[in-house]
Amino acid sequence: MIFATALMLMAAMMLMLVRLLRGPELYDRVLAVNSFGTKTILFLCVFAFLIGRSDAVDIALLYALMNFIATIAILKFFRYRALDVALSRTRRRGETR
Amino acid sequence: MSELLHMLDILRPYVAGIALLSGGVIVLIGASGVLRLPDFYTRLHAAGVTDTLGTLLVLLGLILLSGFTLLSGKLALVGLFLLLTSPAATHAVANAAHKAGLKPRLGTVQSQPPLDASGDPS
């Protein structure tokens, strides 16, 4: 049953890849990448049980954080065309407006 | 009391299997929804199915399989991070699409191609 769950997760990842390649808008592709990352995390957790080693769960834990940061970074880059824009509206000293 | 605990311990792998398989089925349903729904904003709904119920069911099945160990704690942490980050990421994607001027597709019939070429669209 662990193997069946792994197969279903891989099939879902294949469907996500199809949406990633076909997606008409940029945001469809971003959504597909984000959802693919979520399924990758689940697949890593299941894979740790498949091979009988608990190391893959640590990688899944790291990937859960990296996936979120990557999604936010991609969205920020395509909105501002740069990555070093401050997200909050704090003014520097001496800056007017 | 101890008989009840023993019975629950016997039932544990079966409940774990049911949770794992239903989680996998729900993940598949969400993925096919992302593939097949007509609009970006409707695809967000299908992705939300995967992010909440499918994730929780798969991780619950794995936690039930592993018992009360360090591994189950790590799996619970994975679930906690996913529950914290995936709504924020989904909101960020939706907000970026809305700010970029992506309009949701409205109307039902005109956007779909007709099923048979001879029939009149109803």
Image (cartoon, coloured by chain):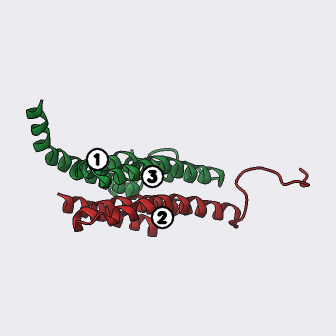
Chain colours: A red, B green
In this picture, residue A8 sits left or right of residue B53? left
CA–CA distance between discs 1 and 3?
25 Å
Query: What's the residue type where badge 3 is placed?
Result: Arg
Residue that badge 3 annotates: B43
**Chain on which label 2 sits:** A
Same-subunit check for callouts 3 and 2: no
Query: What's the residue type where badge 1 is placed?
Result: Leu
Q: Compare residues B98 and B76 and report the one nearer the observer.
A: B76
The x, y position of residue B96, in whole percent, is 61, 53
B100 vs B60: above or below: below
The x, y position of residue A42, in whole percent, is 34, 58
Which of the 4 image quarters holds residue A71?
A: bottom right
In this picture, residue A91 sits left or right of residue A67? right
Residue that badge 1 annotates: B60
Choose mark 1 or mark 3, whichever is in front.
1
**Badge 3 local density, few (<14 within 10 Å), some, or many (20+)?**
many
Disc 3 secondary structure class: helix
**Chain on which label 3 sits:** B
Residue that badge 2 annotates: A23
